Image: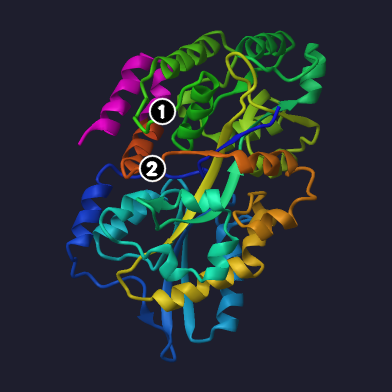
């Protein structure tokens, strides 16, 4: 079966946005008198661009830290463009949106922001249009479907940065020990496999991260497994649909039976992936960026399969798409364009894939990685990706509430928890 993917960017994905972000954006759009953070004159009379980015690595001191990655990119760019200095601030995924909201509120906007969402900035006119900061050559290399989701009312504002996809990982040794012949394809098979794993001594048969790091991603996979989702085909919000409520009732049953991560509403994906790498978890949903964590933990004998749905494996899965965008307050359009052309046209974008096992968003990048067997299942899934409702300005607020509250549906009433999120989505 061909796996179809839902694109999110995550990835990894995204720290909590404060509920006051919309108000902060309005304050800035109305004209704060605070000095700009970016666009200052660099030493020697050049221009300084302020770039704020999420950290895809394991923290500031790690070998794969975002600081180290961006320093390499910036050093190379500045050598080729001596009149432009780039000041980079790398922020943890759990904190970036909150800190950016504060920057915006104080008028200290960056020139370039890389994070998991762009739509909240569009309605207040804070971003350059993509055709103002991308050359035709760079724009033409972006995967069309990805770029299309960077548009609001037909106008591009969000620029695809990296992508990912989701699949079911399973520990082959634990499966063999438990007498499980193959990866589960349905929810009944998944529960049966989890029961066998538990009987064989596995403490966490299924890893279930519903903490605020990426609860929106894990939830979406289960919604899709029952034919649900955040919106229907007409574009109407359906967070509390019967299909979605039933998906959480199923998860509640798994948790109550002791077949999952304990207290999943407080567990983040990196912790659950680390437990999978340590042999404590039998199955977990993950993406290509999970692989380095598994291998670092010493686990190489794992299988990859389509995610199980209620009646069969998904013909769609969550794909993750993160974004980079340019703020217009400081008027550095031409300098930003030079940086973007450098980033996408050189080796920088490829280094992200090499370092973090994230997938490229350009045609040339996909072609370069086509021979990587570990990434092949995910690359094959990308062309059929399904996305979060990025283009809806409400998504920023809804996404925040999902991360903060949806995990409580495991211990409480799924219909009530999802209903509260639905009210936020549909409120004027």
Residue at image point 22% right, 69% down: 34
Asked if one can make out residue 184 in the rendered structure from this viewpoint, the answer is yes
By what rule are the colours in the image chosen?
Answer: rainbow
Position in image of residue 368 (x %, y %): 74, 57
Question: In the image, is residue 362 above or below residue 310?
Answer: below
Residue at image point 22% right, 61% down: 29
Alpha-carbon span between mark 2 and mark 1: 25 Å
Question: In the image, is residue 216 above or below residue 16?
Answer: above
Residue at image point 61% right, 57% down: 362
Stretch of the chain drawn in magenta = 405-428
Question: In the image, is residue 418 above or below residue 92?
Answer: above
In the picture, residue 273 is in which quadrant? top right
Q: Which numbered marker is on residue 16?
A: 2
Position in image of residue 73 (x %, y %): 59, 69
Looking at this view, is 379 or 260 the one in front?
Answer: 379
Q: Is residue 379 left or right of residue 343?
A: right
Secondary structure character of the magenta stretch overall: helix
Looking at this view, is 249 or 44 the one in front?
Answer: 249
Residue hosting label 1: 232
In the picture, residue 182 is in which quadrant? top right
Asked if one can make out residue 293 in the rendered structure from this viewpoint, the answer is no
- In the rendered image, residue 415 lying in the magenta stretch gets the answer yes
Question: In the image, is residue 227 above or below residue 102?
Answer: above
């Amino acid at each position: 079966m061909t796996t179809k993917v839902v694109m999110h960017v995550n990835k990894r994905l995204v720290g909590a946005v404060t509920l006051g972000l919309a108000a902060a954006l309005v304050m800035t759009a109305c004209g704060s008198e605070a000095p700009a953070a970016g666009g200052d004159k660099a030493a020697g009379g050049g221009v300084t661009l302020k770039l704020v980015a999420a950290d895809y690595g394991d923290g500031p001191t790690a070998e794969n830290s975002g600081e180290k990655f961006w320093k390499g990119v910036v050093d190379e760019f500045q050598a080729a463009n001596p009149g432009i200095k780039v000041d980079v601030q790398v922020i943890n995924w759990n904190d970036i949106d909150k800190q950016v909201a504060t920057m915006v509120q104080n008028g200290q906007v960056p020139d370039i922001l890389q994070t998991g969402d762009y739509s909240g900035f569009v309605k207040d006119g804070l971003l350059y249009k993509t055709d103002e900061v991308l050359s035709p050559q760079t724009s033409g290399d972006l995967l069309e479907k990805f770029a299309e989701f960077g548009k609001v009312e037909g106008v591009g504002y969000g620029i695809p940065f990296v992508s990912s996809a989701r699949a079911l990982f399973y520990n082959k040794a634990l499966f063999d020990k438990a007498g499980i012949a193959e990866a589960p394809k349905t929810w009944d098979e998944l529960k049966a496999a989890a029961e066998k794993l538990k009987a064989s001594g596995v403490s966490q048969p299924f890893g279930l991260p519903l903490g605020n790091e990426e609860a929106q991603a894990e939830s979406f996979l289960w919604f899709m497994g029952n034919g649900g989702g955040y919106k229907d085909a007409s574009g109407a919000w359906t967070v509390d649909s019967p299909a979605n409520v039933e998906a959480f009732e199923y998860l509640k049953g798994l948790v109550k039976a002791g077949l999952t991560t304990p207290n999943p509403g407080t567990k983040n994906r990196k912790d659950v992936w680390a437990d999978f790498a340590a042999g404590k978890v039998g199955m977990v949903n993950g993406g290509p960026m999970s692989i380095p964590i598994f291998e670092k933990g010493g686990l190489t004998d794992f299988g990859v399969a389509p995610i199980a749905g209620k009646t069969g494996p998904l013909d769609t899965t969550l794909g993750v798409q993160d974004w980079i965008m340019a703020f217009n307050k400081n008027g550095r359009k031409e300098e930003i364009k030079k940086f973007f052309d450098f980033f996408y046209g050189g080796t920088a974008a490829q280094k992200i894939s090499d370092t973090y096992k994230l997938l490229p968003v350009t045609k040339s990048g996909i072609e370069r990685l086509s021979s990587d067997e570990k990434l092949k299942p995910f690359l094959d899934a990308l062309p059929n990706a399904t996305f979060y409702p990025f283009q809806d300005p409400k998504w920023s607020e809804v996404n925040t509430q999902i991360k903060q509250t949806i995990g409580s549906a495991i211990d409480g009433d799924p219909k009530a928890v999802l209903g509260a999120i639905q009210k936020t989505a549909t409120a004027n």
